[in-house]
Image (cartoon, rainbow, N blue to C red):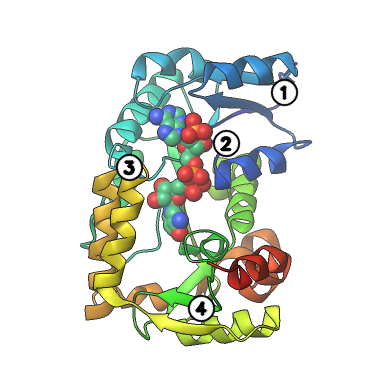
Amino acid sequence: MGNNQNPTVLVLGASGTIGRRVIKDLEGQAVNVRITSRKQVVVDQLTREGKDCTYLDLDDPRTFALALAGVDRVFLLTGYTVAMLTQSKTLVDAAKKAGVQHIVHVGVFAEWDTTDAHFAWHQMIEKYIEASGIAWTHLHPNMFMEVFTGLYIPKNFTYTGYWDDRRIGYIASSDIAAMATKALVEGPQRHGGQHYWLSVESFNGQEIAELLSDVTGLDITYENKGLEGFKGVIEQVVANGGESWYANANIEFVTQMLDGRMSYMSMVQNDIPYVLGRPAKTLREFLEEHKAAIVESATKKS
Ligand SMILES: NC(=O)c1ccc[n+]([C@@H]2O[C@H](COP(=O)([O-])OP(=O)(O)OC[C@H]3O[C@@H](n4cnc5c(N)ncnc54)[C@H](OP(=O)(O)O)[C@@H]3O)[C@@H](O)[C@H]2O)c1
């Protein structure tokens, strides 16, 4: 049962990379947590476990009112789809009607005048949240370190990259979650109107290969496949069910990385110590944690 003195926090994307960690980090904090899922079987299971879990499908605003009733703070995370625009607009409208006081939103690491599509969508959402009158906290993560255990995990002793010698900043999803949790627990008085920039360290492809080699003890080389190679990756992502608008926006991302319009992605801007009072996770620490999986992938016979 919830504590009436504590604010109620509604978490979207609770089964995803960041949301899963937010749920864990919120455990034992002075808030009531309401988990949401678009899968009824998950709602039933968590309810049986005694959790406050409500059905909410971001593509169906009719499911918002019951989920938002009595909620004070919302963790707003959308997936890798252009639908984020309508989903966030309708969710913010409903949050306003439900009397929500604070929205903590996961966006991107971008200059204010970015022209890359999926970055622009996130900025439109941020502006919409701001215009709602609800207090907001905007998280701006750069590329998740999880790419090195996922899409860009080394294979055949090779780390394959697509943006030549350009640098990108990285952040661990556990640190994004920790920042979200802190803002959700401490609320709008402390974190309202804040932009938190989450880009801890910056590397180019060659430096990533060297770090991967150092951590694994293997000789991992860097191969740059460039824009044409990246288009092949995106074809695969879409063939595997990835949403095409978001996927194709990534082609624009690589184009702009290569021609310099997105050179701000190389910036280090790390607000974690200010808010959490501890250092952020480094890429070396992340790779050490996942060394076994990386070695297995890099050495696997194809
Ligand atoms: N990857 C990066 O490097 C990077 C960098 C900066 C920003 N971002 C941003 O991070 C966000 C994604 O975060 P993530 O990696 O944690 O996401 P994720 O792992 O893909 O998880 C997405 C979550 O959203 C839920 N969801 C999807 N569609 C839904 C719907 N219609 N209704 C209700 N829930 C729905 C999913 O639930 P189900 O279990 O039902 O699928 C899942 O819990 C995106 O906004 C992206 O732009 C990513």
Residue at disc 3, CB closer than 8 Å to ligand 1? yes
Above or below, comparing residue 55 to residue 298 in the picture: above
Residue beneath disc 4? 158
Amino acid type of the residue that numbered disc 4 sits on in the rendered structure: Thr
Q: Position of residue 236 (x, y in %)?
A: 34, 54
Mark 4 near mark 3, Cβ–Cβ under 8 Å?
Answer: no
Q: Tell me the distance, in whole angstroms, between the alpha carbons under discs 4 and 2.
A: 31 Å
Residue beneath disc 3? 81
The earlier-in-sequence mark between 1 and 4 is 1
Q: Residue at x 38, y 28 (%)?
A: 91
Amino acid type of the residue that numbered disc 3 sits on in the rendered structure: Thr
The earlier-in-sequence mark between 2 and 1 is 1
Mark 3 near mark 1, Cβ–Cβ under 8 Å?
Answer: no
Q: Tell me the distance, in whole angstroms, between the alpha carbons under discs 4 and 3.
A: 30 Å
Residue beneath disc 1? 5
Amino acid type of the residue that numbered disc 1 sits on in the rendered structure: Gln
Q: Tell me the distance, in whole angstroms, between the alpha carbons under discs 3 and 1.
A: 37 Å
Q: In terms of depth relative to the viewer, which is nearer, 49 or 122?
A: 49
Categorize mark 1 by other alpha carbons within 10 Å: few (<14), some (14-19), many (20+). Answer: few
